[in-house]
Amino acid sequence: MRLKPRQIEAFKSVMVSGGITAAAEAMNVTQPAVSRLIRDLEEIVAITLFERVGARLVPTAEATQLFREVERLYLGLDQIAQAADDIRRHKNIVLRIASVTSLVRPYLHQAIIDVIANRLDIPLVIDVENSRHIWDMVEKNRYDLGFVFTSPRMADKNAVPLHGSRAVAAMAPGHRLANRKIITPADLLDERVLIPGRNSTLRLALDRAFSIEDHQPASTMETSMLNCCYFAASGMGVGIVDHTSLRAAGAAVVAIPFEPRIEVSYFAIRPSGAQRIAVLDQLIRRMQEIIRLSDTKN
């Protein structure tokens, strides 16, 4: 027994519409074509499906039973089509995004509002983590998108550049070093230096700089980039940060270029082989625009 999809479609159309004429219109074929499809189906299944009563076709009890199974089939096909549409639009699938603290406010906040605020069909999880953790989780497909800061040489083909800047020494306006043109490790011998966490590439570059110069600061405090800015503004020490973090913090500090020069770059990263998700591409572009606009204002 080999049924053809067109025969099942004709049977369904007649059952739903109540007649050959209406079924032919629904299928955009002739009435004889529908009649032939029904006749062939009856021969294959060896069941009388319709009886003619006057000018009407009346379904038999067997036809009613068969129609229940056909409805299940079409419901399954509709579910498959809906699932495919959901996958295509990434609908009802949780998007997991992670970002370093420096990019959360105002950049990621504003980008999320601009791109996803009205998309009720997109459930979100947004985590704030350090760059190394985000890299690891993206590689394991635990995050769909990550925003990290790192050195340019660490970027790979799955990373999209967002912004780049150099490290600066941030301090309160009345600090004794506030009038310097540049700040070097030697200038910080008698200072508390506020430094980012050990997992950051900026921290690794700082450790090398202090080691090469053989000038270790009197004291250090390890914390997030934003905290470095806040504590620097309070006069607690000199923070080594970047301009993006300074803008995110909005702290009242003086920023002086740090030597040796340390480049800090921000990237959007995706899992290897990940499907292209349009809303995430839009989010990345909006992040680039917001950071670029912020950079031109400062």
Image (cartoon, helix red, strand yellow):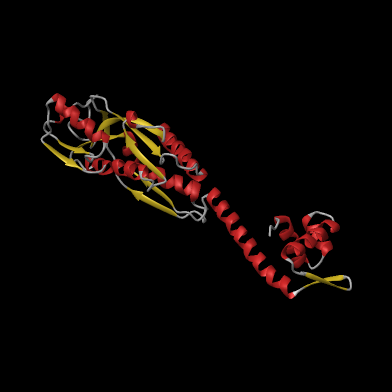
Question: Which of the 4 quarters of the picture holds residue 19?
Answer: bottom right
The picture places residue 96, in percent across and down from the top left corner, at 41, 50
Q: Is residue 165 above or below residue 75?
A: above
Q: Which residue lies at the image location 81% right of the left edge and 54% below the top edge?
A: 29
Q: Is residue 293 left or right of residue 164?
A: right
Q: Which residue lies at the image location 62% right of the left edge and 62% below the top edge?
A: 75
The picture places residue 118, in percent across and down from the top left corner, at 52, 53
Q: Is residue 131 above or below residue 185?
A: below
**From where the camera sits, is residue 170 visible?**
no
Q: Which residue lies at the image location 41% right of the left edge and 39% below the top edge?
A: 272
Q: Is residue 59 left or right of residue 266?
A: right
Q: Residue furthest right?
A: 54
Check the picture and name the quadrant holding the C terminus.
Answer: top left
Q: Is residue 294 above or below residue 56?
A: above
Closest to the observer: 275 or 24? 24
The picture places residue 37, in percent across and down from the top left corner, at 78, 58
